[in-house]
Amino acid sequence: MTGLQMPKVQKSIISNRDKIISDIRKIIRKENVLSHEDEIRPYETDALTAYRQMPLLVALPETVEEVSEILKYCNANKIKVVPRGAGTGLTGGSLPLEDCVLLSMGKFNKILEVDFKNKCVVAQPCVTNLSITQAVEDKNFYYAPDPSSQLACSIGGNVSTNSGGVHSLKYGATTNNLLGIQMVLMDGTITRFGGKTLDSEGYDFLGLMTGSEGLLGVITEVTVKILKTPENVKAALVGFPSIEDAGRCVSEIIAEGIIPAGMEIMDKALTKATNDFSKAGYPIDAEAMMIIELDGTESEVSELIQRIESIANKNNCSSIKINKSKEERLKFWAGRKAAFPACGVLAPDYLCMDGSIPRGKLAEVLKEITRLSKKYNLPVANAFHAGDGNLHPLIMFDANDKESLRKTEEFGAEILKYCVKVGGALTGEHGVGIEKRELMCEAFNNNDIQQQLNIKVALDPNSLLNPGKVYPILRKCAEEGRVHVHGGKTKFPDLPRF
């Protein structure tokens, strides 16, 4: 990504900036159009802060109709639009372009309806993930997907990347908890997919839009299901003398038919950094640590705890600690959710990777990450959702050192290529954005990518919505031997190839 290539800047758009600002101020309130450098500076990056670009302007609509009119105007005038939620994404998915309207959904931050009868919540897209649980917990309900950034990340952003979290093993990712969305297409069409029911007639457009990373439309409303709080919940902290022992324990737990509510692993480096940061009471002498959460009735949980202890002991565990109170259990998880910021003490910067692998390949992939760490001479700390094979290696580097950044990007790319090689995927929940864009040709062949582009062209013929994200530069794929280019031509010649 060093020397990142993005869509060609349209000089005519830049030269017409004042007119575009004036026109959009006729659509939304004047104060909701930001154009001065100090106003738009906060929008130049998301959580992938190594990459920054100031947009043409920032628009903050307040109604669905305003979103529709802005998109209609931009479509008619061939102006690029980059949607943005809370800006917590880790792959550059909301990185602006110099000639784009940065469409911030920040004012769409209200819960519209809490429906306990139908066990669902209707929310605007910039409502934070945690706010949904907070809105229903007094009635003993909660929203299951819980990314580490749940305090700040938006529910619309969760839909855009199909976020998961530490409890996705048992309760699924966003797609498994999503009932409906309202979305505005690039031509201004307001459309709705799904609703309050578990299924709906016709094509599964809801599934298509989930994980689409802002390329197909702008989400303006989300309906999610809520669950009854379990009767009893227990969490175990389990230390192991090696990552391999922890990996075998995970495989045996699943093989026994036990589906924990959550099952996380952290290596020694991350366990120590996190414990120093959060005082969570972790076994800092262990080479690997697991958090295993079990929920159900009191008798079910009691039986499962005994079975988990037996499996852990068979796999050489060095310590087991069961929470004695709800507060202690939440402290266990607070430590895990603070793992990424805790890495700030290990290096000036870190790149958080996000790959997905078959559970049985865990030990093999971790061994390869260790080899690559030595090859690039860059430290790495590991955290992952062990039950569903979602890895989060954290590569330590210094962003002010261009060579360090280059090596980090290569290191991260090799990890993801290896994930694909063993039957996994480039992303588990963070999305593709710009970070993994050039690696898409590792996971998909020419026909796969062209079929996905067919959908993009059908909904956004001018490729104006979040361009430069997700889909690779076809020249790069051709170099990798994955895209057939005949006579210098590919399908969809009307689309910009960046």
Image: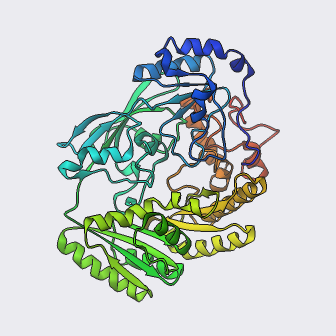
* Picture coordinates of residue 309, whole percent (x, y): 33, 83
Camera-nearest residue between 475 and 248: 248
Residue 422 visible at all? no
* Picture coordinates of residue 170, whole percent (x, y): 35, 62
Which quadrant is the C terminus positioned in? top right
At 68% across and 14% down in the image, what residue appears?
16
Q: Vertical placement of 283 versus 445: above or below?
A: below
Residue 168 visible at all? yes
**Does residue 454 appear to the left or right of 176 in the view shown?**
right
Camera-nearest residue between 148 and 363: 148
Question: How many numbered circles does the render carry?
Answer: 0
Q: Vertical placement of 191 versus 155: above or below?
A: above
Q: Vertical placement of 486 versus 358: above or below?
A: above
Camera-nearest residue between 469 and 246: 246
Q: Vertical placement of 307 versus 422: above or below?
A: below
Quadrant housing residue 196: top left
Camera-nearest residue between 330 and 451: 330
* Picture coordinates of residue 433, whole percent (x, y): 60, 45
**Does residue 316 appear to the left or right of 42 in the view shown?**
left
Quadrant housing residue 464: top right
At 18% across and 49% down in the image, what residue appears?
139
* Picture coordinates of residue 296, whole percent (x, y): 23, 67
Which color mode does the image show? Answer: rainbow
**Does residue 141 appear to the left or right of 311 in the view shown?**
left
